[in-house]
Image: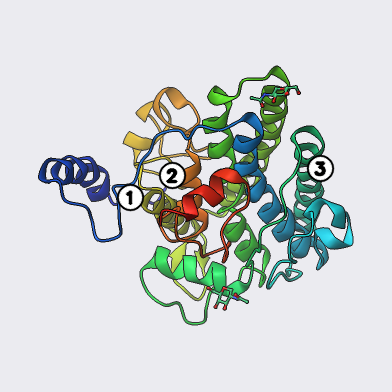
Amino acid sequence: MARVYLPFDFLVAFPILLVGLAAAGVEPDHGPIPTCEPVPGSDAELIHVAMNLEFLEAEFFLHGAFGEGLDSIAPYLAKGGPPPIGGQKAELDPLVRNIIAEFAYEEVGHVRAIYERVGGIPRPLLNISKETFGDVFDVALGHKLVPRFDPYASSLHYLLASYLLPYVGLTGYVGTIPYLRNYTTKDLVGRLLGVESGQDAVIRTLLYERALEKVEPYGVTVAELTNKLSWVRNDLGKCGLKDKGVIVPKELGPEGKLETQVLSSGKDELAYSRTPQEIFRIVYASGNEGVPGGFYPQGGNGRIARSFLHYP
Ligand SMILES: *[C@@H]1O[C@H](CO)[C@@H](O)[C@H](O)[C@H]1NC(C)=O
Ligand SMILES: *[C@@H]1O[C@H](CO)[C@@H](O)[C@H](O)[C@H]1NC(C)=O
């Protein structure tokens, strides 16, 4: 197996930097020191953070598989939110198309489950254009790709783009569960998490099968690209290593024994967890939960997402 290296400098440098800055009473240029702490909220408010992601996944998978979104299936679930920007039917082979079609309907179900059990939020404005994904891939590879990365161009491109989505939801749900109070909401989130992590596992397995394949014309392997995309998320989230590609240095593999990382897991092989602010830093692609952008040009909805926007 080819080895894929993660940049370790950040991992080492990050805590030192924080301590250094705190000691000196200096704030970095982009604003206050990012927090990694849980955010207080009612069960419904905590679940609404994730609902933003469920809308994103629903629209991306529905468009990818069918060329149309939630408004063609269950417009009431959008609660008056605007239609997404830039979704397209993807060029998918029959296997991947079937899988993505299933995921798409699963996401419709997830949005409906949240809507019915805790009350919904209006669908946020979503930008799922190829440019949004293209920008993320540019950042991952550290230069402007020519031609631009197009998530809708092939099954492999679409799977690489999909690699970005359910995993964020998964880590968000893991981070939510300890703070839920009601039995019914824990039941709901456990069930959402189960399916979300299944989706992530399928995407990662399909990518692992092609790990050593070059993503043309960029000359980078699938495995390298997954590590670079994971790295973008770690970097944007600003709370350390919570994300790994499908082949990693052995030290980061399961029990330090293998380079295989079909499932992304941490200490004791448990799932990583992320707080709402980490989630928004990542999906806004801004590294700042107060600065919308990326997939959410106007930010997420729900009390917690909106409260961050008051303190950019
Ligand atoms: C728990 O559920 C009850 C009944 O559905 C509801 O009134 C209450 O607001 C919920 N608590 C939280 C923390 O969401
Ligand atoms: C969608 O995002 C892309 C990439 O950031 C941007 O170029 C484009 O203007 C956005 N579209 C809209 C309508 O905001």
Residue drawn at 46 percent across, 45 percent down: 277
* Amino acid, disc 3: Arg
Indicate the position of residue 3 as horizontal and vertical percent values: 36, 49
Q: Which mark is residue 6?
A: 1
The answer, for residue 101, to whether it is visible in the render is: no
Report which residue position mark 3 lands on. 112
Q: Earlier in the sequence, mark 3 or mark 2?
A: 3
The answer, for residue 224, to whether it is visible in the render is: yes
Q: Which mark is residue 184?
A: none
- Which colour assignment does the render follow? rainbow
Report which residue position mark 2 lands on. 244
Q: Residue furthest right?
A: 73
Residue drawn at 71 percent across, 69 percent down: 87
Q: Is residue 150 above or below residue 50?
A: below
Instruction: Name the secondary structure under disc 1.
Output: loop
Q: Is residue 214 above or below residue 79?
A: below
Real-space Cα distance between discs 2 and 1?
9 Å
Of residue 212 and residue 64, the one placed in the foreground of this image is 64
Q: Earlier in the sequence, mark 1 or mark 3?
A: 1
Q: Contact (CB < 8 A) between labels 3 and 2?
A: no
